Image: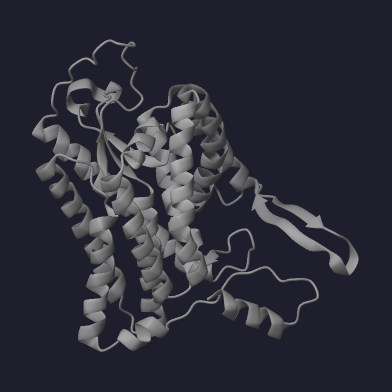
């Protein structure tokens, strides 16, 4: 988490000193960071709730992707390579052309993510007599017994209306790069991530969060790579809010920012604990609310430390111990540590043509 000096602002001329920026007022900072915390909580809360119904879905287009322990162990390495690659690209090639390509890529992804996000809410506004037709997008590979589904996406007319509305936001973002359009896409990405990415058990969650804890600390404190990429990367991979909104209105350009990884990574762990709560069949959501409060505490501590030391902070440094530690203490107090770590979610994998159920089960065990 960090302050952006001039996100989406114009760069100073070569050799010319950057114009002095007036310091943000206490009121402006409070509004900015309070808004970032609220925006971070919304996709975690609603994404976790939607992950419960997503786990029960029979529609292949809405089924979650399950993260195994092997995936979790590899993720920090893949993320580090990607981050370093982006850093080198920004150093070697023109930032303008790279961001143009990224803008087009996230334009498409953002429209799809926002459409999927608003679809359940928009369904309430359609009249009962709305002519809703069903469609199916199906791509297969091979023929006969060897035919395998590559894409099987079911949608209806209501989904197409949501897609059209999302396209308006997409065009706004593509043309103006406005911070509100950026945040709409960022919130949609975060909610979809929490909803559709499922950890298969608590141990996998601890491996993932622990690995990214080291990743975040190294790339923020050990190098300037993450801060450089975050400020150069003009794509909705972060939530931003202006600290000078009260002075400049919607044209404000002195932004505080929060990376989407600091929302989605703890969020999928919090969503797992909600599904664990439901599996206990005690009609309580103790672990979900505990981890949710832990996230608020960790994010608040991040902001506090950042202003004490006047330096960008790796949010996962504070979020990971809080989101793992608080629920674990509750489990110890309730004597449910064994139940917590033995809770298992089945992996979502495509069937391999010709493979028996026993072979699929064995393959799933090896992935864990």
Residue 272: % across, % down: 40, 70
Q: Residue at x 60, y 47 (%)?
A: 159
Q: Residue furthest right?
A: 144
Residue 198: % across, % down: 48, 66
Please indicate, yes or no, whether residue 69 appears anywhere in the rendered image. yes
Question: In the rendered picture of this protein, how many numbered marks are placed on residues?
Answer: 0
Q: Where, quadrant-wise, is the N terminus in this rendering?
A: top left
Residue 223: % across, % down: 31, 42
Above or below, 328 relative to 66: below
Q: Nearer the viewer, residue 216 or 6?
A: 216
**Horizontally, is 154 left or right of 17 in the view?**
right
**Horizontally, is 177 left or right of 327 in the view?**
right
Q: Residue at x 27, y 10 (%)?
A: 16
Above or below, 292 relative to 1: below
Residue 57: % across, % down: 57, 68
Please indicate, yes or no, whether residue 289 appears anywhere in the rendered image. no
Q: Nearer the viewer, residue 300 or 210?
A: 210
Q: Residue at x 75, y 54 (%)?
A: 138
Q: Quadrant of residue 235?
A: top left
**Horizontally, is 34 left or right of 125 in the view?**
left
Rendered image coloring scheme? one colour
Q: Residue at x 20, y 44 (%)?
A: 34
């Amino acid at each position: 988490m960090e302050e952006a000096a001039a996100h989406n602002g114009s760069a100073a001329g070569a050799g010319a000193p950057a114009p002095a920026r007036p310091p943000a007022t206490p009121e402006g900072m409070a509004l900015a960071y309070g808004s970032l915390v609220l925006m971070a909580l919304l996709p975690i809360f609603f994404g976790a709730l939607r992950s419960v119904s997503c786990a029960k879905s029979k529609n292949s287009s809405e089924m979650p992707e399950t993260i195994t322990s092997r995936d979790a162990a590899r993720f920090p390495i893949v993320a580090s390579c990607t981050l370093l690659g982006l850093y080198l690209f920004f150093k070697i090639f023109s930032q303008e052309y790279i961001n143009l390509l990224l803008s087009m890529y996230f334009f498409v992804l953002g429209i799809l993510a926002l459409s999927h996000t608003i679809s359940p809410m928009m369904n309430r506004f359609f009249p009962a007599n709305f002519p809703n037709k069903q469609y199916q997008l199906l791509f297969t590979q091979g023929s006969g017994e060897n035919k395998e589904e590559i894409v099987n996406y079911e949608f209806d007319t209501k989904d197409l209306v949501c897609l059209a509305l999302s396209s308006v936001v997409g065009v706004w973002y593509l043309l103006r790069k406005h911070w509100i359009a950026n945040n709409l896409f960022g919130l949609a990405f975060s909610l979809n991530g929490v909803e559709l990415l499922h950890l298969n058990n608590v141990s996998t969650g601890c491996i993932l969060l622990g690995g990214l804890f080291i990743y975040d600390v190294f790339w923020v404190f050990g190098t300037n790579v993450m801060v450089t990429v975050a400020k150069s990367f003009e794509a909705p991979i972060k939530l931003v809010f202006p600290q000078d909104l009260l002075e400049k209105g919607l044209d404000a350009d002195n932004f505080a920012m929060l990376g989407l990884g600091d929302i989605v990574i703890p969020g999928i762990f919090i969503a797992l604990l909600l599904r664990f709560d439901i599996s206990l069949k005690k009609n309580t959501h103790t672990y979900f609310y505990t981890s949710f409060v832990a996230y608020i505490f960790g994010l608040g501590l991040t902001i506090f430390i950042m202003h004490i030391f006047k330096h960008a902070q790796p949010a996962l440094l504070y979020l990971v111990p809080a989101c793992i530690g608080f629920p674990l203490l509750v489990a110890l107090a309730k004597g449910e540590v064994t139940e917590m770590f033995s809770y298992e979610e089945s992996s979502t994998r495509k069937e391999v043509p010709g493979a028996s159920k026993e072979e699929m089960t064995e393959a799933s065990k090896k992935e864990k």
